[in-house]
């Protein structure tokens, strides 16, 4: 049992501290940047109205601000009609109606559009800068590659249909209702080996598939009257997430710290083993007798007495209990 306890502490120090937690390495978090570019051309024919869609038409910026209820309905003027129990509002006409959603989606061809991701990371502590355009990813390779988790795991060009499929969602459903997909770029590097082995890994996650919409407006003047075309877009939002952006490298300081803590833990292991043997095991009395030696306090001691006589000086040894 004591051997098991000792081995438990030994496994903790060696396996957990040094192997799993990398206690012999220092860690740095990267500073990163991301650039994306979409490619693809779509065509629709709605009631005889033909439209060609390119990137400028179907890519919309993220809506980061929330509008208040007053801004959504318009600005009240203070003029009210008692008969209808309504008040006048200065707003765009006609009133927005988002109940008419095209079915099937207009741009189902977007499944074949491509997304290019360029990402760079810098680890300032180690002075290393890396890009997802690693060794071997040049202009010629990019011109003919398409991401595949097994065949082309480093290709930075992704087909939208593949992204949605790898996230576990249906492209047709997301194109109809809207949703969000997370593209996770994983940078976990070990600089104890060659820097060229520091490469990104791509993972895809469906963040949500609930109805999601984005508003976009195109403004213009007609007969000196300001007008706009309001677009209600039920589309797919792609979030590029960089995680965890960590690199490790050997460092003598955390190594010595880990070793010192391990030595301290072995001292604790000795105390625990003694407590188990002295108080918990059935043969604890035998262990006590082996660990501690008992002695009799009344022992035989030789004392020296000097005996003087009148004529001569003699020294005698008399055995006596002291």
Image: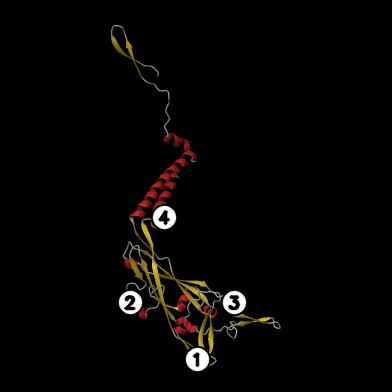
Residue 148 point in image, percent of width and height? 41, 75
Q: Earlier in the sequence, mark 1 or mark 4?
A: 4
Of marks 1 and 4, the one in the foreground: 1
Q: Do we see residue 169 in this rendering?
A: no
User: Which residue is labeled 1 in the image?
Assistant: 50
Q: Answer with left or right where residue 23 lies relative to residue 171.
A: left
Marks 1 and 2, how far apart at CA: 38 Å
Residue 16 bears which disc, if any? 4
Whether label 3 touches label 1, CB < 8 Å? no
Which residue position holds label 3? 70
From the image, state whether disc 2 or disc 4 is nearer to you.
Answer: 2
Mark 1–mark 4 distance (CA, rounded to whole Å):
64 Å
Task: Say whether residue 241 is left or right of residue 234.
Answer: left
Quadrant where the image shows the N terminus: top left
Sequence-wise, the earlier of marks 4 and 3 is: 4
Sequence-first disc among 3 and 1: 1
Can you tell which of label 3 and label 1 is closer to the viewer?
3
Front-lying residue, 290 or 136 = 136
Image-quadrant location for residue 27: bottom left
Q: Residue at x 59, y 80 (%)?
A: 75
Pointers 1 and 2 in contact (C-beta within 8 Å):
no
């Amino acid at each position: 049992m004591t051997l098991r306890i000792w081995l438990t502490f030994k496994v903790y120090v060696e396996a957990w501290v040094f192997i799993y937690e990398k206690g012999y390495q220092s860690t740095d978090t990267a500073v990163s940047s991301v650039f994306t570019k979409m490619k693809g051309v779509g065509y629709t024919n709605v009631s005889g109205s033909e439209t060609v869609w390119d990137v400028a038409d179907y890519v919309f910026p993220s809506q980061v601000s929330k509008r208040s209820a007053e801004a959504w309905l318009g600005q009240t003027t203070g003029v009210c009609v008692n008969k209808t129990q309504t008040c006048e509002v200065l707003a765009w006409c006609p009133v927005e109606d988002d109940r008419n959603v095209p079915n099937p989606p207009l741009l189902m061809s977007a499944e074949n559009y491509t997304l290019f991701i360029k990402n760079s990371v810098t680890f300032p502590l180690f002075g290393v800068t890396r890009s997802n355009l690693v060794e071997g990813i040049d202009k010629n390779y990019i011109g003919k590659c398409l991401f595949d988790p097994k065949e082309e795991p480093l290709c930075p060009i992704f087909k939208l249909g593949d992204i949605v499929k790898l996230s576990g969602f249906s492209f047709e459903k997301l194109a109809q209702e809207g949703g969000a997909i997370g593209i996770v770029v994983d940078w976990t590097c070990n600089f104890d080996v060659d820097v060229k082995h520091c490469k990104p890994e791509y993972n895809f996650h469906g963040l949500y598939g609930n109805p999601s919409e984005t508003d976009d407006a195109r403004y213009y003047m007609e007969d000196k009257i300001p007008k706009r075309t309001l677009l209600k877009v039920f589309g797919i939002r792609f979030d590029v997430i960089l995680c965890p952006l960590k690199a490790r490298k050997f460092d003598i300081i955390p190594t010595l710290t880990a070793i010192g803590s391990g030595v301290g833990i072995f001292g604790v292991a000795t105390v625990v083993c003694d407590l188990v043997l002295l108080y918990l095991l059935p043969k604890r009395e035998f262990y006590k007798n082996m660990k501690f030696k008992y002695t009799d306090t009344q022992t035989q001691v030789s004392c020296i007495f000097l005996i003087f006589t009148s004529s001569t000086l003699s020294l005698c040894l008399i055995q006596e209990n002291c």
